[in-house]
Amino acid sequence: TLIKPSFPVGPPYCRWARGVLMVLTSDMEEGVYKYTVRIQASDSARFANKTLDITITETAVPSVTLIIRDANPNGKYPVTSAIAISGTFDDLDPTIQYEFVWSIKRYETNPLYEVNDAQAAEDRGEVYDVPRMVWIDFSEFYGFNNP
C-alpha cells in the first residue's frame, strides 16, 4: 500500500520506491501531461519505454470501475460466449447530468505501419516513429448505440 508522501521543499515529485513516481499536482495548471519512463539494462543493449497521458483538472472527476461479470480467470473468452460488463461510479455530483459513452477497441496491426519503411529507417540508423500495433475503434462495427 502506498501513502501520499509529505513532499519536502524542492521538486514536486518523489521517487517513492523502485518503479513508483509520485507527483504533487496542486501547483500544476490544467491540461494534459505526458509522463514517460524508460527502463534500460545495465549493458545498455536492451530498453523499453512506456508513456502515459494524465489530465489535470480543477473539477472533481468521478471514479469509474468496470467489472466483467462471471470473469474468466485467464482473461480470455471464446467468440461463442457473451461478455457482460457492468460499471460502477463513485463521487457522482447529483447536480450534474452525465452522459456515458461506451467504446470498444481492438489491439491490432497499425494500418499505417510499413515493414519496408521501418527496416529502411533501421538500416539508416534512424527511428521509424510509427507504432507497429495500435488500438483501433470498432464501436460502430459492433453497433454500440451511444447517445
Image (tube, rainbow, N blue to C red):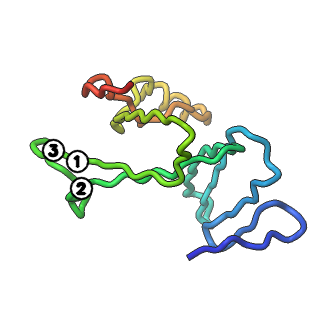
Foreground residue among 33 and 129: 33
Whole-percent x, y for residue 131 in the image: 49, 35
Compared to 81, does 113 lie above or below?
above
> In this figure, which residue is indicated by the disc labeled 2?
69
Label 2: how many Cα within 10 Å (few below 14, some 14–19, many 20+): few
Whichever of callouts 2 and 1 sits on the residue coming sooner in the sequence is: 2
| The quadrant where residue 30 appears | top right
Separation of residues labelled 3 and 1 (CA atoms): 7 Å
Label 1: how many Cα within 10 Å (few below 14, some 14–19, many 20+): few
Amino acid marked by disc 1 = Ala
Q: Which mark, by number, is residue 84?
A: 1
Disc 3 to disc 1: CB gap under 8 Å? yes
Whole-percent x, y for residue 16 in the image: 68, 72
Whichever of callouts 3 and 2 sits on the residue coming sooner in the sequence is: 2
Total label count?
Answer: 3
Amino acid marked by disc 3 = Ala
Quarter of the image with the N terminus in it: bottom right
Disc 2 to disc 1: CB gap under 8 Å? yes
Q: Which is more foreground, mark 3 or mark 2? A: 2
Compared to 45, does 108 lie above or below?
above
Amino acid marked by disc 2 = Arg
Separation of residues labelled 3 and 2 (CA atoms): 10 Å
Whole-percent x, y for residue 65 in the image: 42, 53
Foreground residue among 67 and 41: 67
Furthest toward the left, the residue is 80
Separation of residues labelled 2 and 1 (CA atoms): 6 Å
Q: Which mark, by number, is residue 82?
A: 3
Element marked by disc 2? loop
Q: Residue at x 85, y 61 (%)?
A: 11
